[in-house]
Image: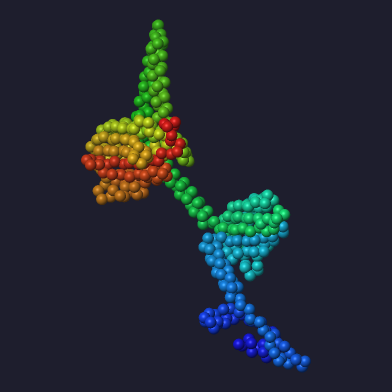
Amino acid sequence: MEKWRVCSASGEPFEDETRFRRAADGEYRWFLIRAVPLRDQSGNIFKWYGVLTDIEDRKRTEQALKRSEAYLAEAQKLTHTGSFASDGSSRKIFYWSEEDFRIWDFDPQQGPPIRDMVLQRIHPEDRDNVLEIVEKALQERREYFAEFRIVLPDGTVRHIHGVGHPVISASGEVIEVVGTHVDVTERKRAEEERDRLRQLEGDLAHINRVSMMGELAASISHELKQPITGAITSANAALRWLKRDQPDVERACETTTRIIKDGTRAAEIIDRLRSLYAKSPPLQELVDVNGIPREMVVLLRDEANRYGVSIRTDLAADLPKITADRVQLQQVFMNLMVNAIDAMNETGGELTLRSELDRDGRMMISVSDTGVGLPAEKADQIFNAFFTTKPHGSGMGLAISRSIIESHGGRLWATANDGRGATFRFTLPITAESDPDNR
């Protein structure tokens, strides 16, 4: 009414949008009101002519559009996704979303940034590569994807995942380019942190292996000494057979064969030790799991004998090979077997290694002992890092072993035996490669 009074007094054309209530049902609807004055020859207004246009549908569409824009802006903010549009030929940017302004730290009051400003924000080491990807894609009339860094005025570096889509005319020309910029900085940092933790985990596993081998140095040196001593003895015998007035070549050959056998055994032991000492990235390969406990029995036999522990194996025949890291599985077996021997170091006993397929078709390995059993009221803590019942233990062996098994898609757990001792079991999945031909 105030606007109408002003226009009535001044004679200016009247235009406004307002709601009128419909008499039939009391519903309010939006109308566009336009009115112009009709003047007499003296210029005085003696009539007004007006038109009322029902714009209810337009208003509802506008409100729906505003809601959609608000939802889109909120979604972009939540997902750190900005959007843009540029001219297909001049590359001039004519649209830059609110979130894109925030990601790139441009001032929205100054309107969409010019292309050179955007290029300057891209990290110098990434700029040429991004330009090459974009230009090549647009020449080929296809979408492009680019991962790059941007450097903000305050020196902050952000990682961006960019996607561009060309809009093609009927004649095949690129009319415009629309696309998105996703701020993936947090994801990149999480990936870097995950890689760092994996490296630390690998370092800890390596330290654990070296520490354990150090603890077993005396036993291992004895294990190595046996074939070396045998080879020396056989070599001396071979010399005696050859130095006789009538050399006994046949016996010298037999003795030489024993030398080769002892030397090969020593070399195999050294190879197993080298693989455990080596610090190398995980290597996935087809592994005969039954072969690993047999290797560990050879390395730990003297350690077990020292404490009156006998080792028994019950390994299922025809188990399929699995895809795994051999060295990591060696470490798991060694950790579990050394723990079992330690549990029986005062009483002696029996260590049993068993392999089988469980009811779900997974490979299951168990290491059982007849020792002191699981720690009372702390059985659920034995896999925690730094938890140990040994006077000089690091508390990392079981934690690392569980981590290794879980990284292979399996599970490691422990249970108390009905009689004396405890049993540690772990499962490993049978991979697609583990068909009968790989057995």
**Residue shown at 34% from the left, 39% from the top:** 358
- Vertically, is 227 above or below 35? above
Position of residue 317 in the picture relative to residue 49 (left or right): left
- Farthest residue in the right direction? 41
**Residue shown at 42% from the left, 27% from the top:** 267
Coloration of the structure image: rainbow
- Residue 54: give x, y in percent of width and height: 61, 77
Viewer-side residue, 368 vs 143: 143
Image quadrant in which you'd find residue 419 = top left
**Residue shown at 58% from the left, 61% from the top:** 82
- Vertically, is 58 above or below 413? below
- Residue 326: give x, y in percent of width and height: 42, 36
Tell me the quadrant of the picture where the C terminus can be found.
top left
Image quadrant in which you'd find residue 218 = top left
- Residue 215: give x, y in percent of width and height: 35, 38
> How many numbered marks have been drawn onto this rendered protein structure?
0
From where the camera sits, is residue 307 visible? no
Tell me the quadrant of the picture where the N terminus can be found.
bottom right
- Residue 105: give x, y in percent of width and height: 60, 64
Viewer-side residue, 234 vs 27: 27
- Farthest residue in the front direction? 24
- Farthest residue in the left direction? 419
Position of residue 75 in the picture relative to residue 390 (left or right): right
From where the camera sits, is residue 413 visible? yes
Viewer-side residue, 98 vs 128: 98
- Vertically, is 113 above or below 21? above
**Residue shown at 31% from the left, 38% from the top:** 367
